[in-house]
Amino acid sequence: MIGAGNVAVHLSRAIQDKGNPVVQVYSRSETSAASLAGMLGAGYTTSLQELRRDAQLYIIALSDDAIPEILPALPLTEQLTVHTAGSIPMSIFEGKMHNYGVLYPLQSFSKKHPVDLSNIPVFLEANTPANLKTLQSIAGTIFSGVYELTSEKRLLLHVAAVFASNFTNSLYDIAAQLSEKAGLNFDLLKPLVMETARKAVASGSPAQVQTGPAKRNDRNVLHKHAELLAAWPQWKQLYLQLSENIKKT
């Protein structure tokens, strides 16, 4: 496991739980490497030159920015090596390694929040059919669905995930701050949040269950909301842009 962050922690533990022992952890931080290795009963190193060469699979679970930086220093050529990034194409390995691919789990990971990988999908890509088969064999024991996906389509999926998760959570934060300004707790919005998510998932088409003033084109309410948000220009602009998108959709 090359990396010891959020994705590396969840992924390595799930892999090991399914009978595929993680033999070594690499991280630039000795504290992080030792911590994850201790969970796994594995060895660890902070030197790429000390990576073992006898593993079946090498997983680069680093931030998107760190992957291009580390590749030139990896002492691997024949070993099957993959990265877990949604926005990095598989072609980044070309000319550096002979066996490579991508293993992209579609989920948001935080170290302190457990994630059951058996409930999420993973998207694979490999440079040869044999390497793809190896990845499918390992991933099939861990994830709920295993899909082959090109780099171009994976990037689209990654953007979709940002809208569905990161942007949505940011909107929750705005909602929480507005609630606090009214002297109320975000907990009061939780039933609404849960019901909206439930309907979107159950419907299979979020557009079909859209509600609210923009959906109704209730200009009076939209105007009142915009006036209220004038004190927070960034939120007002976001409100108007999202309302316009809903109306057009």
Image (cartoon, rainbow, N blue to C red):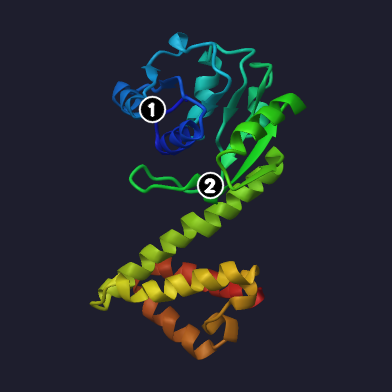
Instruction: Work out whether residue 248 or residue 100 is closer to the camera in this orientation and state it.
Output: 100
Q: Residue 110: which quarter of the image?
A: top left
Q: Which mark is residue 229?
A: none
Above or below, 51 against 13 in this view is above
Q: Could you tell me residue 81's position as x and y percent?
A: 59, 23
Q: Sequence-wise, which precedes: disc 2 or disc 1?
A: 1
- Residue position for label 2: 118
Q: Hey, which residue is sitting farthest left in the picture?
A: 183
* Residue 185 visible in image: yes
Residue type at numbered disc 2 = Ser
Q: Could you tell me residue 172's position as x and y percent?
A: 40, 65
Q: Quadrant of the C terminus?
A: bottom right
Q: Secondary structure at mark 2?
A: helix
Above or below, 101 against 46 in this view is below
Query: What residue is shown at x 55% (from left), y 20% (from top)?
Result: 71
Residue type at numbered disc 1 = Leu
* Residue 128 visible in image: no
Q: Which mark is residue 40?
A: 1
Crowd around label 2: few <14 · some 14–19 · many ≥20 (10 Å) = some
Q: Hey, which residue is sitting farthest right in the picture?
A: 129
Crowd around label 1: few <14 · some 14–19 · many ≥20 (10 Å) = some
Instruction: Work out whether residue 90 or residue 201 is closer to the camera in this orientation and state it.
Output: 201
Query: What residue is shown at x 33% (from left), y 68% (from top)?
Result: 176
Query: What residue is shown at x 72% (from left), y 39% (from top)?
Result: 150
Q: How many marks?
A: 2
Instruction: Work out whether residue 18 or residue 72 is closer to the camera in this orientation and state it.
Output: 18
Query: What residue is shown at x 72% (from left), y 26% (from top)?
Result: 127
Q: Are the residues flagged by discs 2 and 1 in contact, CB closer than 8 Å?
A: no
Q: Secondary structure at mark 1?
A: helix
Q: Could you tell me residue 239's position as x and y percent?
A: 48, 72
Q: Could you tell me residue 232's position as x and y percent?
A: 36, 69
Q: CA distance from mark 2 to mark 1?
A: 19 Å
